[in-house]
Image (spheres, rainbow, N blue to C red):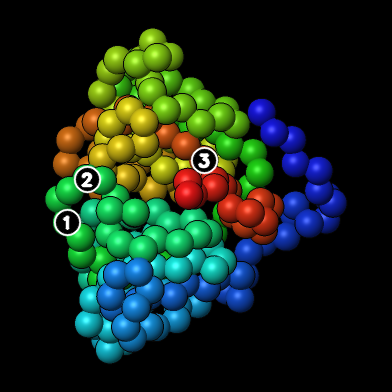
Amino acid sequence: MATDHQNPATKQKQPVASNFKLVIYEQENFQGRCHELTEPCNNIQEADVAKVGSILVLCGPWVGYEQPGCKGEQYVFEKGEYPRWDAWTNSRRSDCIVAFRPIKVDSQEHKIVLYENPSFAGKKIEIIDDDVPSFHAHGYHEKVSSVRVQSGTWVGYQYPGYRGYQYLFEKGEFKECSEFGAVLPQIQSVRRIRDMQYHPRGAFQLST
């Protein structure tokens, strides 16, 4: 596991609005009209953007939503290039994004507990400072109906290998799957979201 060597004062800084910048292009491969976001947008059509064809995240992370008002299917974006819709999702259900908001990452520690049943009951899997591409590989074969995020910001995925629907988990409690946007209590992989304030090259490198 990589170790980050940073000034303690830098670690304690809270992300501010100027730390976020995302550029929407109406066509694939960063073509056509573009629109820059530095703050939440509940409906891109109100900002005179016809559609989202590609996305460039200059400073993030961000979460996009399928429906206005930050509702519907979720898509997490970290620093990098997303030339077409299948670069940000493989759920195959929708290629539509109409709302965005920045994700504030204010902790370097990460701890999440996922429970089999609603209201934090049943079997559980606890994850501390790690990414888990397969719950099955760790011996957890149950559904996920409720979640406690004690620290850090996470994204959960419907299937192993970070595939399928995405669910953003910020610090707090989610007593049932509808509270984190899921129709079915199915999460099989999870990873940390780490802001470029702490990780200047982003949380991961895009393959070339």
Q: Decide: is 30 above or below 120.
A: below
Residue beneath disc 2: 91
Q: Residue furthest front?
A: 208
Q: Decide: is 184 above or below 143.
A: below
* Viewer-proximal residue among 25 and 94: 25
Q: Are marks 2 and 3 in contact (CB under 8 Å)?
A: no
Residue 143 at x, y percent in the picture: 25, 23
CA separation, marks 1 and 3?
A: 24 Å
147 on left or right of 79: left
The mark found on residue 192 in the picture is 3
| Residue type, numbered disc 3 | Arg
Q: Dot 1 lies on which element?
A: loop
Label 3 crowd (10 A; few <14 / some 14-19 / many >=20): many
Residue 111 at x, y percent in the picture: 55, 33
Q: Decide: is 156 above or below 75.
A: above
Q: Quadrant of the rendered structure where residue 88 is?
A: bottom left
Residue 57 at x, y percent in the picture: 49, 66
| Residue type, numbered disc 2 | Ser
Of discs 2 and 3, which sits in the foreground? 2
* Residue pictured at 28% horizontal, 31% vertical: 159
Of discs 1 and 3, which sits in the foreground? 1
Does residue 206 appear anywhere in the picture? yes
CA separation, marks 2 and 1?
A: 8 Å
The mark found on residue 94 in the picture is 1
Q: Are marks 2 and 1 in contact (CB under 8 Å)?
A: yes
Is tag 2's residue or tag 3's residue first in the polypeptide sequence? 2
* Residue pictured at 17% horizontal, 35% vertical: 184
* Residue pictured at 39% horizontal, 83% vertical: 35
